[in-house]
Image (cartoon, rainbow, N blue to C red):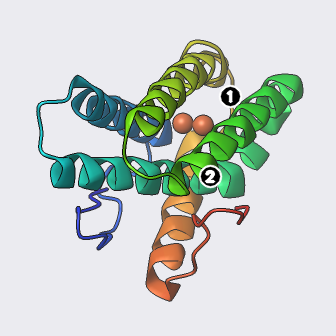
């Protein structure tokens, strides 16, 4: 999936039959964007663009997980999926606060806090949930196809499922 800085969104290009790998790639990418945002050195316009891209990617990623992935894998470990969902809601609250902020030190601190929250959430998913899934007999290819269709329809209809306040 490629989301350009100008907010145009292209379809997910990762293989649908390996949804866990696709989600991991997105995790990797958003962490790289956080690093770029937090390391500084860029001009304020560039930092603003990177910040906007981070929020957009997270919205999209969480919408697909909440809309398709979590409900479909819930049977593997319901409390763990509930924990993942609660971590999303906490991250969304931080994102909501960040959206209302002017650039500056406070916003930078909030981005750092969000980066830490997302890193911890990625650990929950990758080290616990994904591991359990890979050891289960759940049909990941089928789930991946549904995730891709969900994302494509969000993009095609421009449904702002990833907008603040909306739930997938
Ligand atoms: Fe994720
Ligand atoms: Fe997640």
Q: Residue at x 64, y 25 (%)?
A: 133
Q: Residue at x 28, y 52 (%)?
A: 48
Q: Residue at x 34, y 67 (%)?
A: 11
Would residue 36 be found to the left or right of residue 84 on screen?
left
Dividing the image into 4 quarters, which one contains the N terminus? bottom left
Please tell me how crowded label 1 is: few (under 14), some (14-19), or many (20+) other residues with Cα within 10 Å: few
| Residue, far top | 127
Q: Which numbered disc covers residue 49?
A: none
Which residue is more in the foreground, 73 or 127?
127
Q: Is residue 37 above or below residue 12?
A: above
Q: Position of residue 110 (x, y in %)?
A: 51, 33
Q: Residue at x 51, y 20 (%)?
A: 116
As helix, strand or loop, the secondary structure at mark 1 comes to loop
Res 146 → quadrant:
bottom right
Q: Which numbered disc covers residue 137?
A: 1
Disc 1 CB within 8 Å of nearest ligand 1 atom: no
Which residue is more in the foreground, 81 or 111?
111
Q: Which numbered disc covers residue 96?
A: 2
């Amino acid at each position: 999936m490629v989301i350009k800085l100008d907010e145009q969104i292209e379809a997910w290009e990762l293989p649908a039959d390996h949804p866990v790998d696709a989600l991991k790639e997105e995790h990797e990418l958003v962490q790289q964007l956080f690093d770029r945002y937090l390391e500084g050195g860029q001009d304020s316009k560039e930092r603003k663009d990177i910040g906007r891209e981070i929020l957009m990617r997270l919205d999209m990623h969480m919408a697909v997980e909440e809309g398709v992935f979590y409900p479909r894998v819930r049977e593997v470990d319901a409390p763990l999926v509930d924990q993942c969902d609660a971590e999303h809601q906490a991250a969304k609250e931080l994102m909501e606060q960040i959206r209302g902020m002017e650039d500056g030190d406070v916003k930078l601190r909030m981005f750092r806090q969000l980066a830490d929250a997302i890193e911890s959430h990625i650990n929950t998913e990758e080290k616990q949930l994904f591991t359990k899934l890979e050891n289960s007999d759940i049909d990941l290819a089928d789930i991946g196809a549904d995730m891709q269709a969900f994302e494509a329809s969000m993009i095609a209809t421009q449904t702002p499922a990833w907008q603040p306040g909306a739930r997938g």
